Image (cartoon, helix red, strand yellow):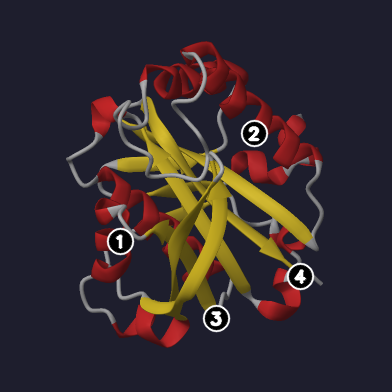
Amino acid sequence: MLVDHWPIRGLKVRTPRLELRLPTEEELAEVADVAARGVHGPSERPFLTPWTDGPPAGRARHVVQTHWSRLGRWTPENWALDLVAFFEGRPVGVQDMRAVDFGVRREFVSGSWIGLDHQGRGLGTEMRVAMLHLAFEELGAVSATSMSFTDNLSSLSVSRKLGYRPDGITRDVLHGEVVESQRFRLSREDWFAREDRLLVTVTGLKGCEEFFGIGG
């Protein structure tokens, strides 16, 4: 079976409303359809990824190719995990976590997107909490980092609500213009100091440790 060779296929993270895991090929097509229907309004630009620059089919292909390419390039020293979030059995978005030399540094960066049809219900926050639980409580991370455009108020709000602290500014170029992102960092100590953490369960982690650079 594929899970015998790629145990991350069996990794699942569950919250009260969501299940996060790798998708099957048909489920990957479904989450690509979610992206095709829209991730943000046409007049908005909340992400460095130019989601509205191309047609819906282009957004769908971007999701599929990113998923395949990240799995194909995976090494214990440099990995990126795209977990699809399922709400009531259907995909609503993607929560990712990426790390270089995680076995030594125990630090990662995360990003996420959620379909327009599913926004406004707190699912984005719950996706992030699921990922943070996996990282801090199961993989032994010491810090989590994230970044958002300085005018992406919803993302900034999630980071602040979960206890991230400001960690400087990053400047990039989008459409020929400089855009600034606020960096955030959440420490292991601040995560475990929270008393309002959701109930999160992780299954299928056994056998995955070496893939994250923490085995042996």
Whether 148 is drawn above or below 34: the answer is below
Q: Nearer the viewer, residue 87 or 206?
A: 87
Q: Nearer the viewer, residue 19 or 53?
A: 53
Residue appearing at x 57%, y 75% in the figure: 140
In the rendered structure, which amino acid carries the disc numbered 1? Leu
Alpha carbons under labels 4 and 1: distance apart: 27 Å
Alpha carbons under labels 3 and 4: distance apart: 13 Å
Q: Is mark 1 on a helix, strand or loop?
A: helix
User: Disc 4 designates what residue?
Assistant: 101
Left or right position of 88 against 191: left
User: Disc 3 designates what residue?
Assistant: 142
Q: Quadrant of the C terminus?
A: bottom right
Residue 52 found in image quarter: top left
Whether 30 is drawn above or below 163: the answer is above
Q: What element carries label 2?
A: helix
The answer to whether mark 1 and mark 3 are in CB contact below 8 A is no
In the rendered structure, which amino acid carries the disc numbered 4? Asp
The reply to whether residue 201 is visible in this rendering is yes
User: How far across and how far down the image is residue 174, in percent?
Assistant: 53, 44
User: Disc 1 designates what residue?
Assistant: 156
Whether 54 is drawn above or below 214: the answer is above
First in sequence: mark 3 or mark 2? 2
Residue appearing at x 46%, y 82% in the figure: 188
